[in-house]
Image (tube, rainbow, N blue to C red):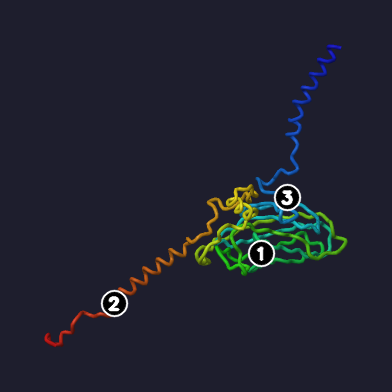
Amino acid sequence: MRITRVWGAALLALGLAAGPAAADSSPSPSASTDGGAPTRAGTSFRTATEIDQGQQATASGSTGDYLYWSFPADTGQRPTVKATVKLPDAHGAETWQLDVYDGLRRRQSCQYGAQTRTAAQGAASVELACVLRTVRGWAEPWANDPLPGTYYIRLTVVDLGAADLGKPVSAEVRADSKDIGGAAAVDGSLGKPLVPGIAVTSEQDEDGSKGAVLSSFGSDDGWSSGWWSDRWVWTGIGAVLAALAGIGGYVLTRGSGRPSQVPPNV
């Protein structure tokens, strides 16, 4: 009886020791396989998967699903969003659409790019793109100008046959931006970037209550919305050049002084 208890305790200890090892050897269902890039997409604005600019995210889903991602964009940047949808082997004609929303969940128009495309029957994939307007540091309340903060990507099919509904698809999404700089600078600045939880956090500063946690991503050096931009540098250079041009014009037009043929007493 005593020997049986000893063997039971030993087997139990071995089982507890092997348990974590076996669990560690099996891959986690939420683990990323692309160097840290997200491999899932959200199903709404609130559950949108966060990605960084320059990071390619992947996700699997079904036709008819709404796939959501979010990324940060700062003042002076012109974001470009690209998406590739890999379709099943057998399918009919499908129309896919890529929409981009700002931090206020206002749909932003694309300057150019194929925002909506129809994949022909049997096509292997469909590619979409949207180049947004340059993000401004400030705008009127009634305007729909893009402002610094979080931007949401929504990818979905908008037209397909009933037989293709629910078929598995995979998507790749990437957001990049071009720094436009002072060429798109405006007077004024946004008090806070439009990121999730910013309103609740502002109230917390006033009454000390606990607020929501802000979005975990943003610019590495902080949000740059403010009065300074490289437009001030070009304005200073222009002022110096204008002053030099004025001095040069004065020197050329004033002449050598009193004409020699005029008598001194005149």
- Name the quarter where the N terminus is drawn: top right
Local packing at callout 1 (Cα closer than 10 Å; few below 14, some 14-19, many 20+) is many
Occupied quadrant, residue 19: top right
At x 84%, y 56%, the residue is 166
Residues marked 1 and 3 touching at CB (< 8 Å): no
Residue linked to disc 2? 250
Q: In the rendered structure, which amino acid carries the disc numbered 3?
A: Arg
Label located before the other in sequence (2 or 1): 1
Residue 173: give x, y in percent of width and height: 69, 56
At x 64%, y 47%, the residue is 210
Residue 229: give x, y in percent of width and height: 48, 61
Residue 129: give x, y in percent of width and height: 67, 63
Local packing at callout 2 (Cα closer than 10 Å; few below 14, some 14-19, many 20+) is few
- Of 108 and 83, the residue lying toward us: 108
Q: What element carries label 2?
A: helix
Q: What element carries label 1?
A: strand
Residue linked to disc 3? 40
Residue linked to disc 1? 130
Disc nearest the viewer among 2 and 1: 2
At x 74%, y 61%, the residue is 126
As measured in the structure, the alpha-carbon distance from the residue carrying label 2 to the one carrying label 3 is: 68 Å
Q: In the rendered structure, which amino acid carries the disc numbered 1?
A: Cys
